Image (spheres, helix red, strand yellow):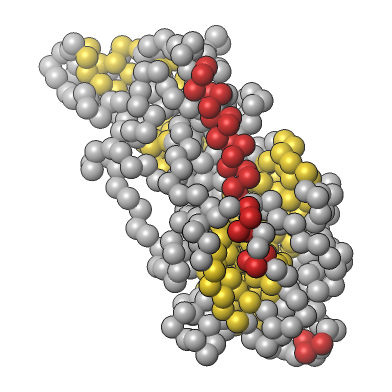
Amino acid sequence: MEHVHCTRAAAALSLLLACAAGEEESDTTAGSTGVTTNTATTSGTSDTAGTASTTAGTDSDATSSETTAVTTQDPTTDPTDPTDPTDSTDSTSPGCGLCDEPNQQCVDDVCVTSCQGQDPDPCGPAQVCDVISGECVDANAPCSLAGPAESCGDASCGPGTVCDGVDACIPIAPCNFMECTGDGACWGTACSCERKVTCEEATAELLNGPFSSDISGIDFADDCNAWSVTLSGGQEFLRKLTPAGDLTTWGGIGDYDQGEVRVLRQLTIPQAKGSTETLTSAPAPAHVEGLGEVALTYVCCPTCGDCNNNPLARGVARLDEENPMMPLPIVIFAEATQGMGPFENKWLDGGPQGLTWGEDRVLYVGNTTANGDYNSANLDTNELTVEYAFAARVTASAPVSAVHILVAIIGGGLYRFNTVTKQADFAVDLMSDVTSLSHDPFTGHVYASLASLEVVRVEPFTGEVEPFATMPGKGRVA
């Protein structure tokens, strides 16, 4: 079987080209001031859930009215500075009265309220409210983030945020933080307008060298190290390839087949600029290697070789570099399960699938107790919990917010699983088995590789799907 992998490097190249196009448009698109002068901020909730609309500078040349992303380079603001425009001028003066909401500032003794957090949108119908600048702009303005709000209990989650499924808004890519008015109207802040290249993955020549021999799964860490696991019929290996081409290998347990590898990564691109009062760096996750811990699956099929009737031959493992005699021990054992897809290969389609990290440093994986079960694996306590039972075998999953994980099941159905409410909402049917899902921390989009050889781009909170690429053979995208 030929293993073909669409690497993040190829995806990033296409996205950067789209950003360049957005920069060219930024010179010709301007926005109006779009503020109101009052002493109170109006807010409310909307019964219609939705996400933000953007144009140039996203990972697609096409303009979408329902896609959460941002564009490049705002002509009026520094796109790399997440500080809210009101931070430097907010005050309460005798002429302004009470003027202390995050979307308000006192200008010449007049309390000016920006369009952020207002319902109805004061910019419509000709323009939209850009929550990054707080100005009314054209729908296709560069470096803008706009869209409807989603009702969330007593709160209202605007662009750059999403409801946690209970009663609070949380920030999502492309934003790192959020602001909320006293009435509960929220929007994203510290939003990325530019995909900054802080490191580059190894070249295609290096990736297609010894690193990819017998490869069955691949992932990239935030520091651009590439990781792979193997399925060869002999002893299997975890490999790390640095951008410079240095290759490190760890041997697995006997000849137990390996399926997926996942590195704990950031869900959004952190911003480097901003005042210390408004921007603080999130604490780094506990490290095993590079910028994140490394986990993998052993996927021995129940009727194959040493895996036959062996209850210890499958499960979830993590890299333990301090134990050279057993660097890849199974920490969560799995029951014997078998599927017929997405690879149509009994060695690849058995055991646990859909491995991913939650932001809570808990591993999530499917089919460890039974086909369709979605399980959490707490590595600190070595406890395995059935979080949800899907109607079919899980094939892939990827985190999309602090509480949401996008999960694929046999047949191509995608669901948003909420780690707080323990519920799963249908997102979209891709009409083909999904081999892998990969979240882009810049746009928030998820790339899905399919058994049909297509790679599609999915907006996880609206279910919108766009074609992205075609693979020469079945593989996994990372």
Q: Residue furthest left?
A: 94
Residue for point 73% across, 51% down: 449
Q: Nearer the viewer, residue 86 or 288?
A: 288
Give the percent coordinates (x, y) of residue 443.
Answer: 54, 39
Q: Position of residue 312 (x, y in %)?
A: 68, 88
What percent of the width, then of the height, locates residue 349? 80, 69
Q: Residue at x 48, y 17 (%)?
A: 26
Residue depicted at x 58% and y 36% = 15
Left or right, residue 139 beside residue 428:
left
Q: Residue at x 29, y 16 (%)?
A: 112
Q: Is residue 5 above or below residue 459?
A: below
- Image: 457 above or below 296: above
Residue sitting nearer the eye, 8 or 166: 8
Q: Is residue 42 visible?
A: no
> Which quadrant of the figure contains the N terminus?
bottom right
Position above or below: 264 against 60: below
Asked whether 138 or 94 is in front, the reply is: 138
Q: Nearer the viewer, residue 372 or 271?
A: 271
The answer, for residue 70, to whether it is visible in the render is yes
- The image quadrant of residue 134 is top left
Q: Position of residue 259 (x, y in %)?
A: 70, 70
In the visual, does 162 lie left or right of 274? right
Q: Is 431 on the left or on the right of 387, as rendered? A: right
